[in-house]
Image (tube, rainbow, N blue to C red):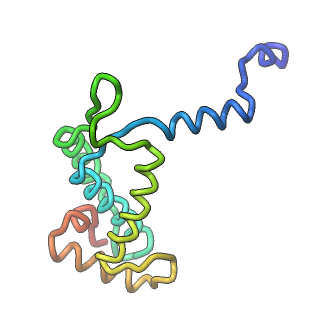
Amino acid sequence: MLIALSGCDVPTPEERRQQAERALDARVVIPAERKQYEQAQFAAAQIAGRCKSLSYSRRYAEKADQEIAAKYPVELDEDGTSPDSVTLKEYLENTVAEGREYWKKIGLPQGDNNSEEVYCAVGQREIANGTQLGAFLRRK
């Protein structure tokens, strides 16, 4: 078995680093509406994970994922770019910054210092207000 595996092409650590850098240079375009949806989905999963009286609706998420992908497809030109495309690295950096703003907007300051009561209160409010985030949550 070892002889068979020795013939496999295993990338070196440097080759893996280069592959990761190439992946981060890939160009992507994510419509603003799709990003907002993804932020709400992520926040709902975090809230449900920290609030025992709420759960994350996987059924709703699966249905909504299909709808949002159809409504806001990620489109690129033939050359793999578009005028408003950014590198994956830029997208990830922007997403982290935008995520922090989103968390503040819904009343959850950055960090794990928020109590379960805070997460539950935010989740309950989002459900009551019928927000996109609230649609991902269910009361247990």
Q: Position of residue 68 (x, y in %)?
A: 21, 46
Q: Position of residue 33 (x, y in %)?
A: 21, 53
Q: 11 or 126, which lies in front?
A: 11
Q: Position of residue 61 (x, y in %)?
A: 28, 52
Residue under the image location 29 percent in, 76 percent down: 105
Residue under the image location 41 percent in, 67 percent down: 46
- Relative placement, left or right, of 14 versus 55 is right
**Residue 105 position (above or below residue 40):** below
Q: 101 or 52, which lies in front?
A: 101
**Residue 116 position (above or below residue 26):** below
Residue under the image location 27 percent in, 72 percent down: 139
Q: 8 or 48, which lies in front?
A: 8
Q: Quadrant of the C terminus?
A: bottom left
Residue under the image location 41 percent in, 75 percent down: 52
**Residue 84 position (above or below residue 45):** above
**Residue 137 position (above or below residue 76):** below
Image quadrant of residue 132? bottom left
Image quadrant of residue 129? bottom left
Q: Position of residue 19 (x, y in %)?
A: 60, 32
- Relative placement, left or right, of 47 versus 40 is right
Residue occupying the far right of the picture: 3
Q: Quadrant of the N terminus?
A: top right
Residue occupying the far front of the picture: 83
Total labels drawn? 0
- Relative placement, left or right, of 45 versus 131 is right
